[in-house]
Image (cartoon, rainbow, N blue to C red):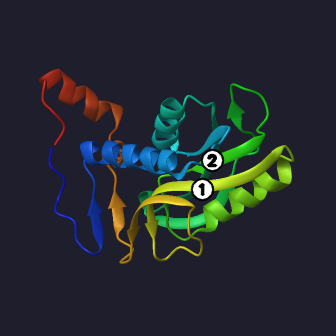
Amino acid sequence: MTPAASTDSDLWVSWDEYHRTIERLCMLLHESGWKFDHVLCLARGGLRVGDVVSRVFDLPLAILAASSYREAGGTQQGELDIAQHITSTRGALSGRLLLVDDLVDSGVTLERVARHLAEQFPGVVEIRTAVLWWKASSSIRPDFYVEHLPTNPWIHQPFEDYDTLRPQQLAAWMKRGTARP
């Protein structure tokens, strides 16, 4: 399915565009010459991004859940919640850390998580941030980004279709053998 046309207020992203944008971020990281030891992604939006970066650079992936977009079906920012624990397969975070998310909107999440990491993980000597989209509304500029969005559009990412899909609806589509709209 082809996404709607993008405007100043809405950026529609297809799966192909989404994957190409992640690959462009990987190339920006590579071309920067900065060497990092761990990738920490913010769940949920940064999960796919962090997974690909971790695989391309063959580095351990750590996951931290953080959420502020729960109100109005995920379209309004509320209070930021940061999980107490980080999931990682290779021990405690240390060295140079790449903090990855899909976008930076207000800057609150990246700023507070980076501060939290610096306080809680003394073995981390440097933290840099990487996102696909940097909105002009952000109070911080990420270290690495693919696109700067001066009009602060709502980004319609392809996985958002799953936000309203329920098992009964999926079962009906699968039974009919039809694709989702």
Q: Is residue 175 left or right of residue 115?
A: left
| Mark nearer the N terminus (2 vs 1) | 2
What residue is at 62 percent from the left and 60 percent from the top? 110
Which image quadrant: the N terminus? top left
Q: Is residue 21 left or right of residue 25?
A: left
Image location of residue 166, percent across then percent down: 34, 37
As drawn, the label of residue 10 is: none
In front: 152, or 32?
A: 32
What residue is at 31 percent from the left and 45 percent from the top? 20
Residue located beneath label 1 in the image: 129
Number of residue marks: 2
Which image quadrant: the C terminus? top left
Rendered position, 102 above or below 61: below
In front: 37, or 138?
A: 37
Q: CA distance from mark 2 to mark 1?
A: 6 Å
Image location of residue 30, percent across then percent down: 50, 44
- Mark 2 is surrounded, within 10 Å at the Cα level, by few (under 14), some (14 to 19) or many (20 or more) other residues, namely many
Image location of residue 39, percent across then percent down: 61, 40
- Mark 1 is surrounded, within 10 Å at the Cα level, by few (under 14), some (14 to 19) or many (20 or more) other residues, namely many
**Amino acid under disc 1:** Thr
Image location of residue 5, percent across then percent down: 16, 63
Mark 2 touching mark 1, by CB under 8 A?
Answer: yes
**Amino acid under disc 2:** Leu
What residue is at 53 percent from the left and 73 percent from the top? 138
What residue is at 87 percent from the left and 47 percent from the top? 122
Residue located beneath label 2 in the image: 98
